[in-house]
Image (tube, grey):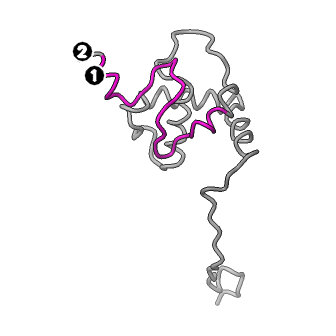
Amino acid sequence: MSEKSKCDIISPRKRAGDEKMPQRRYELSDEQWEQIKDEFPPYKTGRPSKNNNRTMFNAILWIARSGAAWRDLPEERYGSWKTVYTRFCNWRDSGLLVSIFQKLNEEADFENLSIDSSSVKAHQHSAGAKKT
């Protein structure tokens, strides 16, 4: 087996033309990606990114769902955290992220919904009791 074909099998990242990706923790399913893939604007200027829009969006979801810092983004999966952060800022400023999340919310499956009936009582001082 040649070196190139070994890398293609081992590497979890996909090239820009690839559409299907194996789903990992915190990433979009193929069905979710099909709903939003047309929302992304076509690439216009400069050197095209090595990572496609799906990889970049999954990286943003990984950061949001894991609570990790940008610098902790797994580079072997998503590439440079600076590239992902720049793309995030561009999409945030253009309003693209808001429209994507609204589109995904239209057909929510409530898979991760958690309803809890417990209550936590506040201390009496937090309710405006007189201070002594």
Q: Nearer the viewer, residue 105 or 98?
A: 105
Identify the residue at the far right of this view. Answer: 106
Give the residue drawn at x 62%, y 56%. Answer: 111
Instruction: Give the amino acid at mark 1.
Output: Lys
User: Residue beneath label 1, please?
Assistant: 6
Residue 59 lies, in percent from the top left, at 50, 36
Give the residue drawn at x 67%, y 52%. Answer: 109
Instruction: Give the amino acid at mark 2.
Output: Ser
User: Residue beneath label 2, please?
Assistant: 2
Decide: few, some or many residues near mark 1? Use Cα within 10 Å; few <14, some 14-19, many ≥20.
Answer: few
Quarter of the image where one finds residue 132: bottom right
Give the residue drawn at x 66%, y 25%. Answer: 40
The tally of labels here is 2
Identify the residue at the far bottom of this view. Answer: 132
* Residues shaded magenta: 5-34
Residue 31 part of the magenta segment? yes
Magenta segment, prevailing SS (helix, strand or loop): loop
Residue 48 lies, in percent from the top left, at 52, 13
Labelled pair 1, 2 in contact (Cβ < 8 Å): yes
Give how far apart the Cα atoms at labels 1 and 2 are: 6 Å
Q: Nearer the viewer, residue 60 or 94?
A: 60
